[in-house]
Amino acid sequence: MTIFAYCRVSTNDQNTELQVEAIQKAYPDAVVREEKKSGTNVLNRDVLKLLLDMMSKNDKLVVWKLDRLARNLNDLTNIVDTIEKKKASLEILDQRIDTGTASGKAFLQMLGVFAEFETNLRKERQLAGIAKAKQERPEVYQGRKITTDGDEVKALLAKGIKPAEVARKLGISRATVYRYR
């Protein structure tokens, strides 16, 4: 039986120190792996994928808190399903949830619903804050300034110059040239 520990933070300026300490205190011999990726979904979380691939019968994946593993119920369900298919288990250390038990599985699913709810509330608050800021200071939120002279692009195209050459000449992308065409 191998204990795999997954520690995750969202940005490079954060660290996993608290997570690692808590897990090593509970499981001194755990194989600890760290990752700095967003927890919004499991896409592009290579360390987590590697740990899930490495797991086999009777192994255990340990995470410090549920939100370090998944922030929506769908991702959590898929991760737990992957672990269960390997006849392994998952432990959420701070809540002492272990999917090796029936009550642990049920409690984990309830926590997953609340984690997703919390994420959705955070998104709503963020969108409300952005809308308020745009209303209070519309001059700040006008979008990017136009840096390309559309008339110049159109004039060069009218002369029969190919889009790739127009792009090179003006130092812009071909996509920009095609938008003006």
Image (cartoon, rainbow, N blue to C red):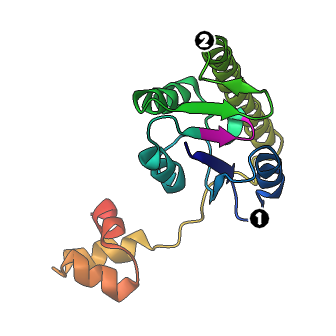
- Image coordinates for residue 50, horizontal then vertical, percent: 46, 53
Please give the range of residues in magenta: 61-65
Instruction: Give the farthest residue toward the left.
Output: 160
| Disc 1 and disc 2 in contact, CB within 8 angstroms | no
**SS state under label 1:** loop
* Residue behind mark 2: 102
Q: Is residue 18 above or below residue 173?
A: above
Classify the position of the C terminus by image quarter: bottom left
36 or 96: nearer the viewer: 96
Picture quarter containing residue 162?
bottom left
Label 2 CA crowd tier, 10 Å (few <14, some 14–19, many 20+) = few
> Which sits in the foreground, 115 or 179?
115
Q: Is residue 158 left or right of residue 139?
A: left
Q: Is residue 62 magenta?
A: yes
Residue drawn at x 66%, y 40% as measured from the top left? 62
**Residue at image point 79% right, 36% down:** 129
Vertically, is 3 above or below 106?
A: below
Q: Amino acid at mark 2?
A: Ala
| Residue picked out by circle 1 | 13
Position of 107 compared to 78: left or right? right
Q: Which x, y percent locates residue 92? A: 70, 32
- The answer to which of marks 1 and 2 sits earlier in the sequence is 1
Quadrant (top left/top right/bottom left/bottom right) for the N terminus: top right
Of tags 1 and 2, which is closer to the observer?
Answer: 2
Residue 116 - label: none
Q: Residue type at mark 1?
A: Asp
Which is the main secondary structure of the residues drawn in magenta? strand
Indicate whether 113 appears above or below 169: above
